Amino acid sequence: MQKGLYLSANLSLLTLIFLCLAWELSLAPLRPGGSWLALKALPLLLPLMGVLHGRRYTYQWASMLILAYFAEGAMRAFADTGTSAALALAEALLSLVFFASAVVYARLTRLSQPRSSR
């Protein structure tokens, strides 16, 4: 199960990075020819190496970072039309997949702590 969560988190994060770049550079940019909004993919690069190496702490804080992408995707899915709305929905779904995978992965990989007797 850990391996599946690990792969799911990796795949969703990498896909989200490429989606953000493709969306704002060619598929449906805010301005013809591309948009500076493509820089929104940069914060996703911060947890990339930690996620690829399976570092629990990175999964923990990245699960909070990804919520901003979910919020943007949900908002633009309702506000935009056409291709941009479809891409926004994909962003929201990828964010949810990463969030769920990261939270469960972090929970399953925590060290067993002995319970204190009360």
Image (cartoon, helix red, strand yellow):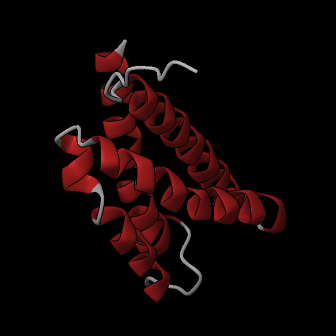
Task: Locate residue 64 relative to residue 47 in the image: left or right.
Answer: right
Residue 95, horizontal then vertical, whole percent: 55, 47
Front-lying residue, 14 or 80: 14
Front-lying residue, 83 or 50: 50
Quadrant in the picture for residue 46: bottom left
Taking the view exactly as shown, the residue that stands out farthest to the top is: 1
Quadrant in the picture for residue 82: bottom right
Front-lying residue, 31 or 97: 97
Quadrant in the picture for residue 118: top right
* Count of marks placed on residues: 0
Identify the residue shown where x is 31% and y is 38%.
Answer: 10
Asked if 19 appears above or below 110 in the picture, the reply is below
Residue 99, horizontal then vertical, whole percent: 53, 42
Identify the residue shown where x is 22% and y is 50%.
Answer: 50
Asked if 65 appears above or below 86 in the picture, the reply is below
Taking the view exactly as shown, the residue that stands out farthest to the right is: 78
The answer to whether one can see residue 12 in this image is: yes
Residue 84, horizontal then vertical, whole percent: 65, 63
Q: Quadrant of the N terminus?
A: top left
Residue 90, horizontal then vertical, whole percent: 59, 46
Identify the residue shown where x is 33% and y is 18%.
Answer: 2
Task: Locate residue 77 relative to residue 88 in the image: left or right.
Answer: right
The answer to whether one can see residue 81 in this image is: no
